[in-house]
Image: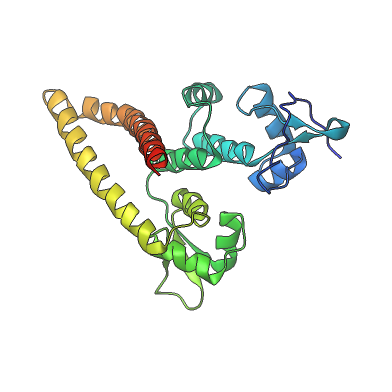
Amino acid sequence: MTTDTGKDSGEGAGEGTGERALTVDELAARAGVTVRTVRFYGTKGLLPPPVIGPRRVGHYGRDHLARLALIEELQRQGMTLTAIERYLRRLPPDLTPRDLALQRAVVASWAPDAVETVTWEALDERAGRVLAAEDVERLVAMGVVERDGDSDGDVFRVDPGLLRLGVELLDVPLSPESILAARNVLIEHARAAAHELSGLFRDAVADRDPQAVKSLSAHMQPLVVQALLTTFQRSLKEELRGWMEEA
């Protein structure tokens, strides 16, 4: 069994959540990376240390898995390790695995659309779990997955950047209708914000050459998306806190 050193934080990774903690080998296999990569990220401070259990075995949880997925996505976008370190340091320290999955979905949105056509079996592999027929129908209803009408059998079109977030939503106790309504609200307000910001930036660079405008767009997009995401997360937490206090 592989051992790992790290800070003992008392409660084991996954304890109290009904989920089994992962060894470093299991974490690497689930994330699709090598054990050496996991340890390297740990030494660079990109991953928090594992919880040390009996026999000095390091235990990892869903937060490590979600952070690994985010790091890999940032690397796919061409960011260096130094840039990734800066990016991760700017994130709030108390992000949940769902928050990290949302961050990854946002990062994936920086890249051009990359819709893939996959079989049901390949969809299971990308989702990291076996999807029942009901799960697939919920993903279709949310607009995360589309059935490929040009193919025979169970073939789907999917944006990998949205899939993990959609899979996370499968465990949220909301009906597909409620999730779709929430999606429509987000799209409406996101489009309004994008329109206002686009007008603001357009006025700011109206007298500059096209290359300068293109450069500004490339630099501003991730910063604006990060700012919108952080503001939204804080606002939502405040709204939910007020709602729970009233309840």
Name the side, left or right, on which 44 lies relative to 199.
Answer: right
How many marks overall? 0
Q: In the image, what residue occupies the spot 57% across and 64% down?
A: 131
Q: Nearer the viewer, residue 199 or 165?
A: 165
Check the image and tell me how it is coloured. rainbow
Q: Quadrant of residue 220?
A: top left
Q: Which x, y percent locates residue 9?
A: 71, 27
Query: Would residue 14 be visible to someone looking at this image?
Result: yes
Q: Quadrant of the C terminus?
A: top left
The quadrant in which the N terminus is found is: top right
Task: Tell me which residue sits at (39%, 74%) in the image.
Answer: 149
Q: Which residue corresponds to the image point at 76% horizontal and 40% vertical from the top-left?
A: 23
Determine the residue positioned at 54% across, 23% down.
85
Q: How far across and down, in percent of the image, does residue 113 sit?
A: 38, 49
Q: Is residue 67 above or below residue 156?
A: above
Q: Is residue 228 rendered to the left or right of residue 160?
A: left
Where residue 67 appears, as percent x and y from the top left, is 57, 36
Front-most of residues 235 and 44: 235
Q: Let me know if residue 205 appears in the view.
A: no
User: Residue 179: horizontal and vertical position, in percent?
Assistant: 38, 57
Seen as rendered, the residue at the extreme bottom is: 152
